[in-house]
Amino acid sequence: MTQDQEQPLIAHLVELRNRLLKAILAVLLLFLSLFYFANDLYLILVEPLSSLLPDSKNMIATGVASPFLVPFKMTLVLAVLLAVPYILHQIWAFISPGLYQHEKRFAIPLLISSIVLFYSGIAFAYFVVLPLAFAFFTAAGPEGISFLPDISNILNFILKIFFAFGIAFEIPIATFLMVLTGITTVESLRAKRPYIFVGCFVVGMLVTPPDVISQTILAVPMWLLFEIGVLFASLIKAREADAESEEQDAA
């Protein structure tokens, strides 16, 4: 490798380092600004469960350090989630110089859509899924069994649900990109609808708690989001086909 080839590589590595440091700094600043409110934020996070508990029952901490570590972990994850738009902006700023103009035309709407869909998945999980799941769990126990949930287990459960639904809501973007890059076609995806429908329920069974309600609430939106992705991909492909035919007619 010549010196001329080494210099751009070093410059790219330096830029990558700088953008990673900016992303980490953004997460750190958010964490420090939120940590003072960590306990209040945790109470807001577990409100779908705490609102179902009788007044005589509270959540418990079985670990010695749990009262500190659980809010700490929650605040750190929250800081990362809030910093996602800025982190993606840094990624975009790093890779955009190497993209063609037509690639940038699709990349920016896809980037914005992926952020909106991810946050929509988390909001759906918090306002719809968690109340239903917790209502099921608090009512399903045998009579005479005291339901005293541990704060660490609750946090892990909620974060698992958040990320499952946040990622599941990215299905339209993944479907669109698969068609756009030629990995598959709209016709092939439509032909595989029955398998994808069953696959959504299998995924729901694997990533959600072992109850039919949570599995169905994840599987049905996944299938609908897949259909939305196929619809948008078919519209874009139809538009491209019309543009090509117009160019051929003009020629």
Image (cartoon, grey):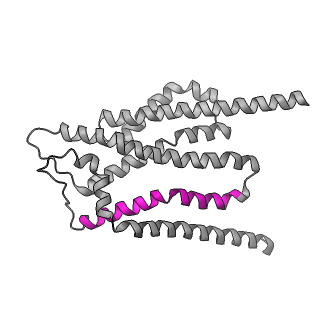
Observer-nearest of 124 and 151: 124
Q: Residue reaching furthest bottom?
A: 3
x and y percentages locating residue 39 in the rendered image: 28, 62
Residue at 53% x, 49% y is 115
**Is residue 170 one of those drawn in magenta?**
no
Residue segment shown in magenta: 67-96
- Quadrant position of residue 70: bottom left
Q: Residue at x 25, y 47 (%)?
A: 49
Q: Quadrant of the rendered structure where residue 136 is?
A: top left
Q: In the drawing, does residue 47 fall left or right of residue 22?
A: left
Q: How many marks?
A: 0
Quadrant (top left/top right/bottom left/bottom right) for the C terminus: top right
Classified by dominant secondary structure, the portion drawn in magenta counts as helix
Residue lying farthest to the left in this orientation: 144
224 sits to left or right of 242? left
As drawn, 249 above or below 218 = above
Left or right? Give the position of 54 relative to 73.
left
Residue 185 in view of the camera: no
Q: Quadrant of the N terminus?
A: bottom right
In the displayed orientation, state which residue is furthest to the right: 251
Q: Is residue 25 above or below residue 205?
A: below
Say if residue 26 shows up in the picture: yes
**Of the pair 46 and 77, the residue shown nearer to us:** 46
Please check the rendered image and state whether residue 92 is part of the magenta-colored stretch, yes or no.
yes
Q: Residue 78, how many percent across, how many down?
A: 41, 59
Q: Nearer the viewer, residue 191 or 93?
A: 93
Q: Residue at x 75, y 51 (%)?
A: 100
Residue 237 placement (x, y as % from top left): 70, 32
